[in-house]
Image (cartoon, rainbow, N blue to C red):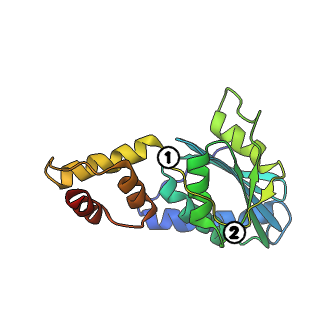
């Protein structure tokens, strides 16, 4: 069953949704959920599923990895679980490691072998459900960040724009920019002098 809510003020809408999430545990005869497990299938369209004490509560896709940390913090604040566990598929290594490194130390995280989790229909969400329900290996440290070729090329493209098409920084410098070791302006200076 789906329910539509019409409000003129979006603030009211978000407050209403927040309260409905908190009340969600009462529907199941509980004051709150003991354990929330969030399954994440990383990728271009990251599938996410929220399971509260074995019941699927929400499922959705996220198109921007930068939003995942704030989404997880909202889930924690909205549902107020006793325990919150993140289970993430191990397949897409660059995106997986970025998500893990962004949230490491704030949540318990397990990496799950996601082989044979991607069905043909609603692929990302269904895979996230299977990931959430499968025990994984606990993450005990931040992981090495690996970058996709497109991310590196994008930083190189930006260096050309910022230098008025005079400089294209090297792949090595682009990776240093992506890791936050240096900013793009410093990378351009280094490339110019080198």
User: Where does the C terminus fall, quadrant-wise?
Assistant: bottom left
Q: Which residue is mark 1?
A: 63
Q: Residue at x 81, y 72 (%)?
A: 31
Mark 1: secondary structure:
loop
Residue 46: percent from left, percent from top:
58, 45
Classify residue 80 as left or right of residue 9.
Answer: right
Front: mark 2 or 1: 2
Count of marks placed on residues: 2
Q: Residue furthest top?
A: 120
Classify residue 60 as left or right of residue 39.
Answer: left
Q: Earlier in the sequence, mark 2 or mark 1?
A: 1
Q: Residue at x 21, y 48 (%)?
A: 160
Q: Which residue is mark 2?
A: 107
Disc number for residue 105: none
Classify residue 56 as left or right of residue 2.
Answer: right
Which of these two is toward me, 17 or 3?
A: 17
Query: Does residue 74 appear anywhere in the picture?
Result: no
The quadrant where residue 143 appears: bottom right
Q: Dot 1: within a 10 Å radius of its alpha carbon, few (fewer than 14), some, or many (20 or more) residues?
A: few
Residue 8: percent from left, percent from top:
41, 60
Report how far apart the C-alphas of labels 2 and 1 lie in the structure: 21 Å
Which of these two is toward me, 150 or 1?
A: 150
Pointers 2 and 1 in contact (C-beta within 8 Å): no
Mark 2: secondary structure:
loop
Q: Dot 2: within a 10 Å radius of its alpha carbon, few (fewer than 14), some, or many (20 or more) residues?
A: some
């Amino acid at each position: 069953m789906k329910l539509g809510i019409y409000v003129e003020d979006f603030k009211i809408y978000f407050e209403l949704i927040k309260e409905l999430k908190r009340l969600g545990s009462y529907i199941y005869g509980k004051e709150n959920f003991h354990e929330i497990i969030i399954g994440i299938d990383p990728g271009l369209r990251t599938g996410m599923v929220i399971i509260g004490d074995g019941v699927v509560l929400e499922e959705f896709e996220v198109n921007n990895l930068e939003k995942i940390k704030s989404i997880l913090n909202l889930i924690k604040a909205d549902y107020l679980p006793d325990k919150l566990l993140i289970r993430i598929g191990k397949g897409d290594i660059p995106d997986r490691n970025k998500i893990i490194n962004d949230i490491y130390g704030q949540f318990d995280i397990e990496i799950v072998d996601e082989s044979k989790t991607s069905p043909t229909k609603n692929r990302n969400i269904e895979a996230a459900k299977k990931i959430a329900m499968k025990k994984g290996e606990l993450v005990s440290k931040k992981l090495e960040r690996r970058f996709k070729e497109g991310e590196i090329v994008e930083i190189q493209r930006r260096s050309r724009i910022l230098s008025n098409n005079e400089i294209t920084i090297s792949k090595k410098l682009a990776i240093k920019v992506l890791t936050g070791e240096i900013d793009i302006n410093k990378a351009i200076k280094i490339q110019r002098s080198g």
